[in-house]
Image (cartoon, rainbow, N blue to C red):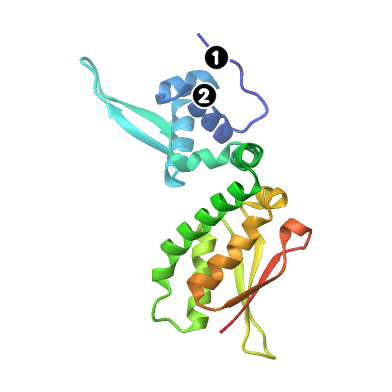
Amino acid sequence: MRGTPITGKDTREKLLFLLKTRGQMTVDDLSRELDSSGVNVRRHLDSLERDGLVESIVQRRDRGRPVFLFSLTDQADGLFPQAYDVVSVEILQQVEEQFGREAVCAVLQGRAEKIIRRIKPHMDGKPLRKKVEEFSRIFNEMGYLTRVEADAKSDRLSVLVHHCPVLVIARDFPEVCDGDCTIGRESLDADVVRECALSEGASCCRFWIQP
C-alpha cells in the first residue's frame, strides 16, 4: 500500500522524509513511493551517502540476490526540527519550582565544571594566545560560532561569540553566561570579563581576556 503522498519537496528531501518516517527501505521501496526510476533514486542516495546523511547495509535473502537497506545516520537528525533548548528550559524551570533558584545555579555550575575538566588539559603549557585560540576552537566544536580578536592598544584578547547554542536557556537563566566566564577563567588561567551578551540583545557576546 502506498503511504501518504509527499508533495512540495525535491527528491532529496522526499528521500530523507521517507527514511525518517519509514525506517530502512530498499531502492525499490523508495522508487515506488516516489514514483521514480531506480536509477534516479540511487543517484540521490549515493549523494546522501557521500554527505554522511544516509548509510546502507546488505540484507541477504534465502533466494535471489541480496538487497541494500538504506537508513538515516545520526548526522541526519540535525536536518529535522529540534526542541532540545525548549525542553532544557522547561526542565530548569521545574528544578527552580521544586528546589529553588540555588538548585538551578548548582546544576549550571556542575555543567561548567564538567566542561572545564574536559578542555583544561588542552591548555597546558601553551602561551595565552594559543590557549585562547584553542578555547575558541573547542567552543566552535560545541556548537558556538566564535572568533578571536586582539586589542591593538593593550595586551588583551577577546573572544566574540556570534552564535550560542544555549541562547534560549540563557535568556531565562543568565547564570549560563556566568558559567561561561568561569569556564574561561579556570581553563585559561586568566582574567575573563564579559562585556556584552546575545541574551541581553547584543549582536554578539564579547569576552575580554588578559593575564
Please, is residue 69 above or below residue 136 in the view? above
Residue 19 in sight = yes
| Disc assigned to residue 199 | none
The residue labelled by disc 1 is 3
Instruction: Give the camera-side residue of 157 and 94.
Output: 94
Ranked by sequence position, the earlier of labels 2 and 1 is 1
Q: Quadrant of the C terminus?
A: bottom right
As drawn, 102 above or below 55? below
Amino acid, disc 2: Thr
Q: Is residue 208 left or right of residue 185?
A: right
The quarter of the displayed image where residue 207 is located:
bottom right
Give percent across and percent down for residue 145. 61, 61
Which residue shows up at 65% across the image and 64% down it?
161
Going 43% across and 74% down the picture, which residue do you hit? 123
Q: Nearer the viewer, residue 41 or 206?
A: 206
Per the model, the C-alpha gap separating discs 2 and 1 is 10 Å
Residue matched to label 2: 21
